[in-house]
Amino acid sequence: MEQISIFDIFKTGVGPSSSHTLGPWKAALEFTDMLKNNKVLSVEVELYGSLSKTGKGHGTDVAVIMGLQGFDPETVDTNKIPDYIEKVNKSNQLFIDNQYIFFNPSEDIIYREYPLPYHPNALTFRSLLSDNSIISETYYSVGGGFIVKEADKKQTKTYKDLPYPINTERDLDKYIDSTKLSISEIVFENELQFNSKELIRKKILELWDTMLDCIYQGCCKSGTLPGGLNVKRKAKHFSAGLLNNIETKDREEWIKAVKACEPTFNNINKWISCFAIAVNEENASMGRIVTSPTNGASGVIPAVLMYHYCFGNYKGENDIIEFFLTAGEIASLFKKGATISGAMGGCQAEIGVSSAMAAAGLADINGGTPDQVLEAAEIAMEHHLGLTCDPVGGLVQVPCIERNAMGAIKAVTASNLALSINPENAVVNLDTVIKTMWETAKDMNIKYKETSEGGLAINIPVLPNC
Ligand code: SF4
């Protein structure tokens, strides 16, 4: 079974979708590597299944154009993406490996609504070279920004030997019993096989800084989100109302003002929603976000952690570190036992998983026992089972943006419930809910798995360019 680092789960990226934007972007980057040192005459891309049905709204076309030109989703200036795309659209040229290549996006990106058998999100790149040979590769974007190459899909990979290989909650329980370590300590020992102690801390704190920035940016911007659905940004309005319209000059001053806000139930509830919505408005406008575990669900973790940071019992940076380690392991359990892809499992696999991650992380840093932490994850997922994915207009906006607020609130409730009970009396454990989520995913009609062919997506009138 696969061994996953928490930095495979949490990645700095660009919105709006990990499976439809980040994955195809990474696939295009990989394919460009294959073209190196060749005289390239043409490139075409075929998008299959869900990537075809919701690819336009999810920015798949933009992602492949950016990836083919070698831009890194972690470092690209997200404000310049529209300019780069306009340049390609106007010139019908791509700049690949120091060569200009004719590329007409409306003809060379081909949408095929049928899926390939291995996974609903597939894309094939094909290039004609000057010696008349063809280089071609198919990739599957399997959720959370993870990609699998056609050639690798049946191969057994060699994984690092971890001191605590964990595939199920039962494995984790076994190590907790035998070592008396906490969940985050066990995950940290495993992470040391991938990164040094110092690097783990540094990388987590950088991710947290990106999340803080994303929340702040979302709370500073007004206007309408791109895509034609005419969704107005709300986070700035919420933030201004909660702060009684006081002016703040930068992120730190804004955070200080948030922390000074009266911590009533209603205020805290509104702030959690505001934080989640701010992130997902940034995500919807191709802003810089942290995939956690997907882009569509990227607002839940920052909202819950920001709640703890501003209104909870925040004790310092170790809280951030422990939260990420625990939440990352929960995502890994879902990825191994079920799925974190909306196209495979509906929204229970995205918002449900992020809510479970956040609930566990919060319970951990609030002093929960390992059993309570795992129970928090179980409760959060139990109440997302069956949640469908039906993005209106194929955009990651409705219901996605508000759904992050709901996932965050449920995570806080799940954490509080788990901290108040004796987990020995729990009827459902985490392994059972993961198994149930996967069975539900397999039973779910394809209409509700990121195709925009069912649910809200067919009941809301959308403009033709959505
Ligand atoms: S409905 Fe849920 S799973 Fe589907 S795109 Fe939106 S956030 Fe992702």
Image (tube, grey):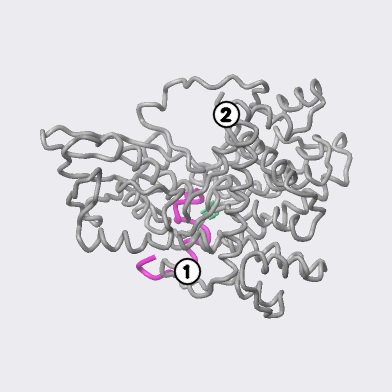
Q: Residue at x 82, y 26 (%)?
A: 180
Q: Which residues are magenta?
A: 447-466
Residue 355 shown left or right of residue 47 in the figure: right
Viewer-proximal residue among 365 and 418:
365
* The magenta stretch spans residue 448: yes
Residue 194 numbered mark, or none: 2
Circle 1 sits in a helix, a strand or a loop, which is it? loop
Quadrant into which the N terminus falls: top right
What residue is shown at x 33% (from left), y 35% (from top)?
A: 138
429 and 11: which is toward the camera: 11
In depth, the one of 44 and 429 nearer the eye is 44
Choose top left, top right, bottom left or bottom right for residue 155.
top left
Q: Amino acid at mark 2?
A: Phe
Which residue is found at the position 42% from the left and 23% from the top? 154
Q: Marks 1 and 2, how far apart in space? A: 38 Å
What residue lies at 45% left-to-right and 55% top-to-bottom?
453
Prevalent SS, magenta region: loop
Are the residues at dot 1 and dot 2 in contact (C-beta closer than 8 Å)? no
Q: Nearer the viewer, mark 1 or mark 2?
A: 2
SS at badge 2 = loop
Measured as percent of width and height from the top left, residue 297 is found at 58, 52
**Quadrant position of the C terminus in the picture:** bottom left
Residue topped by disc 1: 225
Amino acid type of the residue tagged 1 in the rendering: Leu
Q: Is residue 274 left or right of residue 425?
A: left
